Structure formats: C-alpha cells, structure tokens
Amino acid sequence: MATTTRGRIDKRQAILEGAFAVFARLGYAQACVQDIADEAGVAKPTVYNHMTDKATLFRGAVEAAAQMTLNARLAALEPLADPGEDLRATLEGVADELLRLHTDGRSCALRRLLYSEITRFPDILDIVKESGPDRLNQALADRMARLALAGRLRAADPDLAAEQFMALLVGPLEARSQMGTRTIPEGELRELARAAVRAFLDAWSAD
C-alpha cells in the first residue's frame, strides 16, 4: 500500500512539473494535455486520473511551482537565525541568495505566467501570494523581530523592516531584468545585494 501511494504521489508531482514546463513554454491556450503527458512521461489518461481538466491542471501546476519557489526562499533565510558577529555579511549572503532565486528559471517562468494569464485566471494571483511573497515576508519579519530583540536592529516594526528589505532587493531587480527577460550577471546581482543591505542597515541598524 505504501509503495502504491508513493508511486501515485510521484506521478502527480511529475505531472505538475511537466505541466508547468509546458505552460511556461507554450502558454495556457497553446498547451495541450498530450504535451503535458509527454513531458511528464505518463499516459494521457493518467493525467486525467490526477487532474480533471486543463484548467485544474494549470492551477495545480502554478501552485506547486509557487510552493517550490517559496521553500527555496525560506531556506535562504536560515542564516539569519544565527547571523554571527558580522550581521552585514550575513544579510548580504541572504540577499545574494534571494536575488539568485528570484532570477532562476522557475521564478521567471512563474511571473511570466502570472502576467500573461491573470485575466483568464484571476484567482492565480491569490494562489501565488499565499505560497509566495506573503509567506516569505512573514518568515522574514520573524527573523527581523528576533534580531531586534537581540539588539542587532532597531526595535520598531519587523513587518515593515521585512517589507523594505525585500523592496530594496526586488524593486531594482525587476527594472534591470526587464520583468525577467534579461539575464543579470552574477557580479551585478552581488552589487544589488550589497547596495540593498547598505540602504537597509542605514535605516534599521541598532548601531
């Protein structure tokens, strides 16, 4: 029974990942279930056994991709749990990783799908937010609150601190990447990370 359940979960995951790849490559209208089955390495009826129709498959694929993206970004915050003596260096490391994740293939494809299909699927904005920015900001605010309690940051509003930290990263990045259509060199990403951390600490450092 456990093996059967594991196999079903694995097939579902393969279908969702295959669907996301096809939707990202072709868009919703041009994608067909057979393309998705081929991408996932399963038979077409297997796709329908897991997802009732293409619209349900699209929503499931977007939600799964958003959750995977969120998990990676939450992991990027872990160094803030124990930042050591050099808070600036730790924040720069976190900023570097968040920028790298924001510009990876899955994240860029997710944003392009959101922009292109939002009128067809207005509910995907809520799906992405619930598994994306809102959860990330909550986790980051928790880290900021702990740093404030430790006297490392000003004890003001950790939610605002988290929001501003992300805005300092993502705002310039979106402009420079032209909404994910331009690849930004690693050196430029590091410069953006350092500039964001410098501005953040100027505003929030307890020193």
Image (cartoon, rainbow, N blue to C red):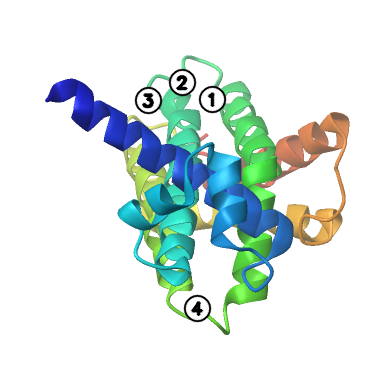
Q: Residue at x 46, y 22 (%)?
A: 79
* Three-letter amino acid code of the residue under disc 2: Pro
C-alpha distance separating marks 4 and 2: 41 Å
C-alpha distance separating marks 2 and 1: 6 Å
The residue identified by callout 2 is 83
Is residue 159 shown to the viewer in this render? Answer: yes
* Three-letter amino acid code of the residue under disc 3: Ala
Looking at the rendered structure, which numbered label has been put on residue 17? none
Q: Nearer the viewer, residue 83 or 154?
A: 83
Q: Nearer the viewer, residue 127 or 58?
A: 58
* Three-letter amino acid code of the residue under disc 1: Leu
SS state under label 1: helix
The residue identified by callout 3 is 81
Kindly indicate whether the residue at mark 1 contacts the one at mark 2 (C-beta within 8 angstroms): yes
C-alpha distance separating marks 2 and 3: 6 Å
Q: Residue at x 62, y 22 (%)?
A: 89
C-alpha distance separating marks 3 and 4: 37 Å
Kindly indicate whether the residue at mark 1 contacts the one at mark 3 (C-beta within 8 angstroms): no
